[in-house]
Image (cartoon, rainbow, N blue to C red):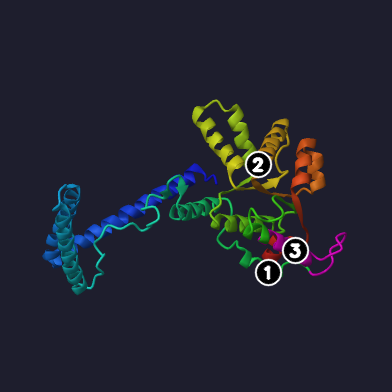
Amino acid sequence: MAYDPDVLRRASARLEEEKRRREDERELLRRQTYAREPRLAQLDRRLQGTMAELVAASLRKGENAGDAVRAIRDKNLELQQERAVLLGALGLPEDALDDKPACPKCGDTGWRGAQMCDCLRSLCTQEQIRELSKLLDLGEQSFDTFRLDYYSQSVWPGRGTSPRDNMDLVYEVCLNYAQKFGRFYFKNLFLSGAPGLGKTFLSACIARSVSEQGRSVVYDTAGNIFAQFETRKFQRDAEGVQTALDETRRYLTCDLLILDDLGSELTTQFVQSALYELLNTRLVANRHTVISSNLTMEEAARRYSPQIASRLIGEYHVLHFFGDDIRLLKKNKL
């Protein structure tokens, strides 16, 4: 799983910020509680002292060492019981003033050895969805809000089926692709059809669902993606090159790439080379890609090189979008 470094940085900063906030709140509670019951401050100091005594006694040699350890433990328990009673009288649980992590699995570090903890992964997911929302409207975009009633029930000319029946099948494929991500029969999807038929909406639904599973997702338009590859190759400014390197690395290594509007770019020899690198690298690494395009697969095969056409035709499952422009239908209903 390869999260965008910026996503990971922001998530880690949030984890640390929340940790500091809890510590500040706990320290404030301590001061307020000690002011209400000064005996608690004395007990906490004595408990800290008994812990040091316990360590020293444990290291001591001789036949009396065991007796000393037991005596200190008994004293420690006695102090803890008195402390619990005083806290209870103030309406507080016995561990209210204790330093305890919000995540016991990782101790609020975000990592369990070399593995990312669920607490940090959850924050990465939130940050990733926020990042995706800059380009995709994820506010209302979910499989639950997808509406088939915008699609006609009449048989569409040359298709042999209605837009609604077709979109019912398209929806099911997209839903299963997202919910069973990495386990679904189809690894890569090619969403083909005219503008305004729901390709971007269903792409957003897939992006949200896969992100919520803790997978790294990158969405971008073909034009932006190829521009970053071009900057990586031709830019002379060191900072610009590094930014392009980071961006292209995201495209190549994320769990799911959603490449929107393929075919809208000026198809130069460089674009052909960049698209081949993108598709081939992801296929070799078994990483999944969703492409949306106004082109049919046949048009894409003619537009791009034979090597690209071979990978698109052989490795991508085509979903056809047809019917009336949904944007216009919505506008006319206003």
Identified at 46% across, 55% down, the residue is 118
Question: Nearer the N terminus, badge 3 or badge 2?
Answer: 3
Q: Quadrant of residue 87?
A: bottom left
Q: Amino acid at mark 1?
A: Lys
Q: Which residues are magenta?
A: 153-175
Q: Amino acid at mark 2?
A: Arg
Viewer-nearest of discs 1 and 3: 3
Report, in whole angstroms, how far the alpha carbon at label 2 lies from the one at label 1: 42 Å
- Residue 172 as seen in the image, left or right of residue 128: right
Percent coordinates x, y for residue 202 in the rendering: 66, 58
**Nearer the observer, 289 or 164:** 289
Q: In the orientation shown, which residue stands out farthest toward the top? A: 236
Q: In the orientation shown, which residue stands out farthest toward the front? A: 63
In this rendering, the answer to whether 160 lies above or below 253 is below
Secondary structure at numbered mark 3: helix
- Badge 1 is on which residue? 333
- Residue 107 as seen in the image, left or right of residue 169: left
Percent coordinates x, y for residue 191 in the rendering: 73, 53
Question: Nearer the N terminus, badge 2 or badge 1?
Answer: 2
- Badge 3 is on which residue? 169
Q: Quadrant of residue 270?
A: top right
**Does residue 45 appear in this view?**
no
Residue 161 is inside the magenta segment? yes
Report, in whole angstroms, how far the alpha carbon at label 1 lies from the one at label 3: 26 Å
- Residue 275 as seen in the image, left or right of residue 142: right
Q: Quadrant of residue 30?
A: bottom left
Asked if labels 1 and 2 touch by Cβ distance under 8 angstroms, the answer is: no
Name the mark on residue 282.
2
Residue 324 is inside the magenta segment? no
Crowding at label 2, few (<14), some or many (≥20) Cα neighbours within 10 Å? many
